Image (spheres, grey):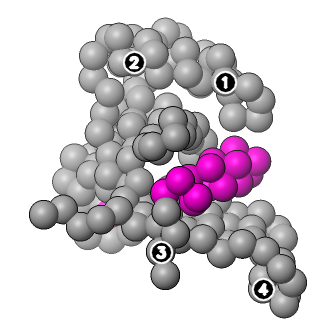
Amino acid sequence: MTDTLEIVAPAFVEMAHRIVWATVATVDTAGLPSTRILHPIWEWDGSSLTGWIATSPLSPKAKHLAATPSVSVTYWTPNHDTCTATCTTAWESTDAEREAGWKRFAEAPAPVGYNPKIIPGWETPLAPRFGILRIEPVALRLLEGSLMTGGSGRRLAWKAPAAS
Protein backbone atom coordinates (compact mmCIF):
# COMPACT_ATOMS: atom_id res chain seq x y z
CA MET A 1 0.00 0.00 0.00
CA THR A 2 1.23 3.47 -0.85
CA ASP A 3 0.37 6.46 1.30
CA THR A 4 -0.26 9.89 -0.20
CA LEU A 5 2.51 12.44 -0.50
CA GLU A 6 0.45 14.75 1.76
CA ILE A 7 0.79 12.17 4.57
CA VAL A 8 4.39 11.04 4.00
CA ALA A 9 6.17 14.30 3.12
CA PRO A 10 5.54 16.20 6.40
CA ALA A 11 6.52 13.13 8.46
CA PHE A 12 9.63 12.68 6.32
CA VAL A 13 10.71 16.33 6.74
CA GLU A 14 10.15 16.19 10.51
CA MET A 15 12.30 13.08 10.87
CA ALA A 16 14.99 14.22 8.40
CA HIS A 17 15.36 17.63 10.05
CA ARG A 18 15.50 16.02 13.49
CA ILE A 19 18.28 13.64 12.39
CA VAL A 20 20.03 16.27 10.15
CA TRP A 21 22.88 14.18 8.64
CA ALA A 22 22.14 11.68 5.87
CA THR A 23 23.99 9.00 3.98
CA VAL A 24 23.71 9.95 0.31
CA ALA A 25 24.45 7.35 -2.35
CA THR A 26 25.34 7.91 -5.99
CA VAL A 27 26.48 5.55 -8.72
CA ASP A 28 30.08 6.17 -9.77
CA THR A 29 31.31 6.22 -13.35
CA ALA A 30 32.15 2.50 -13.16
CA GLY A 31 28.57 1.67 -12.08
CA LEU A 32 29.49 1.07 -8.43
CA PRO A 33 27.73 2.61 -5.42
CA SER A 34 29.43 5.46 -3.60
CA THR A 35 28.22 7.01 -0.33
CA ARG A 36 28.98 10.09 1.73
CA ILE A 37 27.42 11.98 4.64
CA LEU A 38 25.61 15.18 3.66
CA HIS A 39 23.28 17.71 5.21
CA PRO A 40 20.15 18.34 3.08
CA ILE A 41 17.40 20.84 3.81
CA TRP A 42 13.88 19.86 2.80
CA GLU A 43 10.95 22.10 1.88
CA TRP A 44 7.34 20.90 1.80
CA ASP A 45 4.90 23.43 0.35
CA GLY A 46 1.76 21.34 0.79
CA SER A 47 1.91 19.76 -2.66
CA SER A 48 5.57 19.10 -3.52
CA LEU A 49 8.70 18.17 -1.61
CA THR A 50 12.11 19.51 -2.64
CA GLY A 51 15.47 18.94 -1.03
CA TRP A 52 18.59 21.07 -1.29
CA ILE A 53 22.20 20.08 -0.70
CA ALA A 54 25.04 22.59 -0.48
CA THR A 55 27.97 20.75 -2.06
CA SER A 56 30.80 21.23 -4.50
CA PRO A 57 30.09 21.01 -8.23
CA LEU A 58 33.79 20.11 -8.58
CA SER A 59 33.58 16.95 -6.44
CA PRO A 60 33.67 13.30 -7.52
CA LYS A 61 29.95 13.26 -6.63
CA ALA A 62 29.34 15.83 -9.38
CA LYS A 63 30.98 13.50 -11.91
CA HIS A 64 28.77 10.64 -10.71
CA LEU A 65 25.65 12.80 -11.04
CA ALA A 66 26.62 13.89 -14.56
CA ALA A 67 26.39 10.23 -15.62
CA THR A 68 23.50 9.16 -13.37
CA PRO A 69 21.52 12.14 -11.98
CA SER A 70 19.93 10.28 -9.05
CA VAL A 71 20.61 9.85 -5.34
CA SER A 72 19.35 7.82 -2.44
CA VAL A 73 19.23 9.82 0.80
CA THR A 74 18.92 7.84 4.06
CA TYR A 75 18.66 9.09 7.63
CA TRP A 76 19.13 6.83 10.67
CA THR A 77 19.12 7.22 14.45
CA PRO A 78 20.36 4.78 17.11
CA ASN A 79 16.73 3.94 18.03
CA HIS A 80 16.37 2.83 14.38
CA ASP A 81 14.10 5.61 13.16
CA THR A 82 14.86 5.68 9.43
CA CYS A 83 13.67 7.55 6.40
CA THR A 84 14.83 7.35 2.81
CA ALA A 85 14.22 9.47 -0.28
CA THR A 86 15.05 8.24 -3.78
CA CYS A 87 15.55 11.40 -5.83
CA THR A 88 16.31 12.90 -9.19
CA THR A 89 18.90 15.68 -9.12
CA ALA A 90 19.75 18.93 -10.87
CA TRP A 91 22.35 21.60 -10.17
CA GLU A 92 21.11 25.12 -9.52
CA SER A 93 23.20 26.93 -12.11
CA THR A 94 22.30 30.62 -12.18
CA ASP A 95 23.82 33.17 -9.82
CA ALA A 96 20.35 33.89 -8.40
CA GLU A 97 19.73 30.19 -7.70
CA ARG A 98 23.10 29.78 -5.99
CA GLU A 99 22.52 32.92 -3.89
CA ALA A 100 19.04 31.65 -2.92
CA GLY A 101 20.55 28.29 -1.95
CA TRP A 102 23.22 29.97 0.18
CA LYS A 103 20.56 32.04 1.91
CA ARG A 104 18.39 28.94 2.47
CA PHE A 105 21.18 27.31 4.50
CA ALA A 106 22.37 30.50 6.21
CA GLU A 107 18.88 31.45 7.39
CA ALA A 108 17.40 28.04 8.22
CA PRO A 109 16.83 27.35 11.90
CA ALA A 110 19.15 25.02 13.81
CA PRO A 111 19.89 22.20 13.55
CA VAL A 112 19.61 22.22 9.73
CA GLY A 113 20.80 25.78 9.17
CA TYR A 114 24.46 26.80 9.17
CA ASN A 115 26.74 29.45 7.72
CA PRO A 116 28.15 28.04 4.47
CA LYS A 117 31.32 30.14 4.95
CA ILE A 118 32.55 27.51 7.45
CA ILE A 119 33.42 25.24 4.51
CA PRO A 120 36.87 25.96 2.99
CA GLY A 121 36.51 27.42 -0.51
CA TRP A 122 32.94 28.62 0.09
CA GLU A 123 33.66 32.31 0.67
CA THR A 124 30.54 33.46 -1.22
CA PRO A 125 27.56 31.90 -3.03
CA LEU A 126 29.41 32.47 -6.31
CA ALA A 127 32.63 30.72 -5.27
CA PRO A 128 33.54 28.04 -7.86
CA ARG A 129 33.60 25.31 -5.19
CA PHE A 130 30.09 26.17 -3.89
CA GLY A 131 27.04 24.62 -5.47
CA ILE A 132 23.43 23.85 -4.74
CA LEU A 133 22.05 20.47 -5.73
CA ARG A 134 18.25 20.33 -5.98
CA ILE A 135 16.82 16.89 -5.20
CA GLU A 136 13.24 15.86 -5.96
CA PRO A 137 11.88 12.63 -4.50
CA VAL A 138 10.35 9.94 -6.66
CA ALA A 139 9.91 7.67 -3.64
CA LEU A 140 9.85 8.11 0.15
CA ARG A 141 9.96 5.59 3.00
CA LEU A 142 9.73 6.21 6.72
CA LEU A 143 9.92 3.71 9.57
CA GLU A 144 9.80 4.50 13.26
CA GLY A 145 12.23 2.24 15.09
CA SER A 146 9.69 1.29 17.75
CA LEU A 147 8.05 -1.00 15.19
CA MET A 148 11.17 -3.17 15.17
CA THR A 149 10.66 -4.06 18.83
CA GLY A 150 6.95 -4.75 18.56
CA GLY A 151 5.83 -1.30 19.66
CA SER A 152 3.57 1.11 17.90
CA GLY A 153 4.83 3.56 15.33
CA ARG A 154 4.53 4.66 11.75
CA ARG A 155 5.57 2.91 8.59
CA LEU A 156 4.88 5.16 5.61
CA ALA A 157 5.74 4.90 1.94
CA TRP A 158 5.04 6.97 -1.16
CA LYS A 159 6.03 6.52 -4.77
CA ALA A 160 5.49 9.01 -7.59
CA PRO A 161 3.06 7.88 -10.27
CA ALA A 162 4.76 6.43 -13.33
CA ALA A 163 5.25 8.94 -16.13
CA SER A 164 3.04 8.34 -19.11
The residue wearing badge 2 is 98
For image coordinates 69% across by 34% down, the residue present is: 112
Q: Nearer the viewer, mark 4 or mark 3?
A: 3
- Circles 1 and 4: CB atoms closer than 8 Å: no
Q: Tell me which numbered mark, 1 or 3, is placed earlier along the sequence.
A: 3
Name the residue type under label 4.
Answer: Met
Q: CA distance from mark 4 to mark 3?
A: 20 Å
* The C terminus - image quarter: bottom left
Q: Tell me which numbered mark, 2 or 4, is placed earlier along the sequence.
A: 2
- Circles 4 and 3: CB atoms closer than 8 Å: no
> Image height check: is 50 above or below 68?
above
Q: Nearer the viewer, mark 1 or mark 3?
A: 3
Q: Tell me which numbered mark, 2 or 1, is placed earlier along the sequence.
A: 2
Q: CA distance from mark 2 to mark 4?
A: 41 Å
Label disc, if present, on residue 148 of the rendered structure: 4
- Circles 1 and 3: CB atoms closer than 8 Å: no
For image coordinates 29% across by 65% down, the residue present is: 161
Toward the bottom, the furthest residue is 150
Circle 2 SS class: helix
Label disc, if present, on residue 2 of the rendered structure: 3
